[in-house]
Amino acid sequence: MELLVASAVGAMTASGLYLVLRARTFPVIVGLAMLSYAVNVFLFATGRLAIDLPPVISDTAEAYTDPLPQALVLTAIVISFGMTAVIVVLALRAYLESGTDEIDTAAGECEAGQPNADTSHAAEGAEAGR
Amino acid sequence: MSDLTLDHWILMPIVLPALMAPAIVLAMRHDLVLQRVFSIAATFALLGIAIDLTFQAAGGPPQLYELGNWDAPFGIVMVLDRLSALMVLLTAILAVGVVLYATTSGWDKRGRHFHALFQFQLMGINGAFLTGDIFNLFVFFEVLLIASYGLMLHGGGAKRARAGLQYVAVNLMGSTLFLFAVGTLYGVTGTLNMADLAIQVSRVPASDQALLQIAGVLLLIVFAVKAALVPIQFWLPGAYANAPGPVAALFAIMTKVGAYAILRVYTLVFGGGAGDAAWLAADWLMPAAIVTLAVGMIGVLGASGMIRQVCFAVIGSMGTLMIAIALFTPEATVAALYYLIHSTFAAAALFLIADLVVARRGADGDRLRTAPRFPQSGLLAGFFFAGAIGMAGMPPLSGFLGKLLVLDAAMSSPSMALIWTVVLTTSLICIVGFARSGSTLFWKSAQVGLPQVGDTAAEEDASPVPPPAPSTMTMAEGLPFAAAGLMLAGMVALSAFAGPITDYLEGTAWQLYNPVAYIQAVLGPDAFTGQ
């Protein structure tokens, strides 16, 4: 079981990292979601993996599993879910306002110099799309 | 004051903004005047509480607040010691300046919910400074980040949205790393309370040392993202330069949250009592800090716009601050804390001044080129001069004293020659950078539009000639200047009262390097004998 959980965390982290390094917003957001799944499973495993053991005190239990990681995972799930929602909305807004979903056109460069050819081209594309 | 209020007084810097923010959203969302009144009143009340807490912290040992009355290490605790009181006070002073500026300059009208987000941001920052639990630190980081996303996007616009997207993505990565680090730390030590961690870390068996140190270094990376250290400083200029002026000024404290977390965790948990993992951060932090300082100040020289220049100056000042922290001696920590206070004021003042300049230059924005002169350019030039002197570390403002303290503390370090060379060279680079932008923005621009000027390139920009600057300001125009001036006054006060302030900081450093009092305040007097 340890091998299964560990390799799942590893695979999700690796694919999450790969996706985060892509140049468009959609893969980046999916990658961030993958990373948050990976970290949730990882947090769950930090209390050691145990089967058929209750986390809260009961009269019939012989041993217990660690309840704290379960509380931590709940907190982490809520926060990462909210954050994913925020970044999805933000990505949509950035796409609709600037007409491109490339993540690393340095905003400062457009601001500092001449209007960026790349951006204006993409804006035309967005208008054509409408 | 009754005992009950006293008991809960430590929690007030978190509770007050936490109640004020929803009240503003729910009850006052259609009335900007009410929002302003309550937000400003709450910020001043926060300042009063912070002053009181600082006096309390200065007069005694660390104080404990157990949430829900659960004993540590089982419940979450808030701890008030000299360092956290100092940081809360600094936040409150900065917040007063920022909320006055945002109100008087009309920034809070340009979008919705500025004041509610502002109060949530204060709640997150104060919580991060006061908490004694590392997972709770993560939660307060998220609170302040969520509020900062909203504030950064305040006012809207395509550029701001794209810069905001990058900022959010970087911070989400940071949060994920934080959780990995906290999970590893819990897996190895079985606790998340910082005082308890300080004890458990020394008892970690040799077979788990590698895991423990990985967790420690992961945590350092997370805090380095917040503190904008090389190689993870790249998000800062884009985010701060595209944020509204008063928000960027408030963000001056956000990088310090990272610095605070490094100082807290790596003196308490991975400090002298940590066995094999003692002073884990020092080896990694020092090279990163020196490169950060160099990168930041070279950025000041090469920046294309006034606001970006201030952003790079912030990165450079974080480098100086981190050099002092990375020395990990009490003297160096006094220097670090003094420089931390100073650089918060300097950065906030420069962001506000840059915002005032940009608002007056119209289409030219913050670009470093000559443009028609604008109203109050003389006064703004004076403000910018003072802010730049402070940031570059020239006398008489507190930047000079701060750098002097850092250099003095580095005397005993083996890498003293390197530190001195880098700090002094980058100070010169910073002075040149600010002198260049100051002369372009104020001096050369003052000639543009006057009939005797023959500079053709400048004359193209100069038409139509604006009316001459009015010699007197109205009250409404003057108030934002007063708010920016408050930050400059902070630097003046910091140099004028350097004696009492360094006395307080020496006590702070003593507490940090003798964490027994902190641990006993949290876990009880027999913390070291038990378990």
Image (cartoon, rainbow, N blue to C red):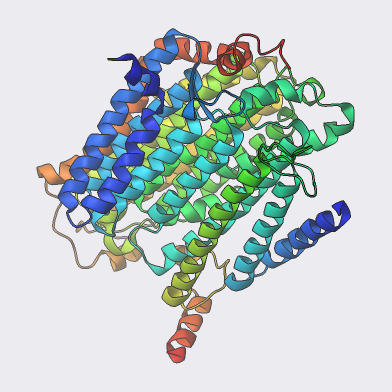
Quarter of the image with the N terminus of chain A in it:
bottom right
Q: Is residue B329 left or right of residue B456?
A: right
B430 w.r.t. B148: above or below: above
Q: Is residue B160 left or right of residue B471?
A: right
Which residue is at the far front? A60
Q: Which residue is at 61% across, 28% downward?
A: B74
The number of numbered badges drawn on the structure is 0
Q: Quadrant of residue A128?
A: bottom left
B309 w.r.t. A27: above or below: above
Q: Which residue is at 46% across, 85% downward?
A: A126
Residue B472 appearing in the image: no
- x and y percent of residue B511 in the render? 56, 13
Q: Which residue is at 46% across, 90% downward?
A: A129
Comparing A91 with B134, the one in front is B134
Residue A1 appearing in the image: yes
Q: Which residue is at 71% across, 19% downward?
A: B413
Comparing B202 with B26, the one in front is B26
- x and y percent of residue B480 in the render? 22, 43
- x and y percent of residue B37 in the render? 18, 42
B460 w.r.t. B217: above or below: below
Q: Is residue A37 left or right of residue B29?
A: right
- x and y percent of residue A82 in the render? 51, 58
Q: Quadrant of residue B490?
A: top left
Quarter of the image with the C terminus of chain A in it:
bottom left
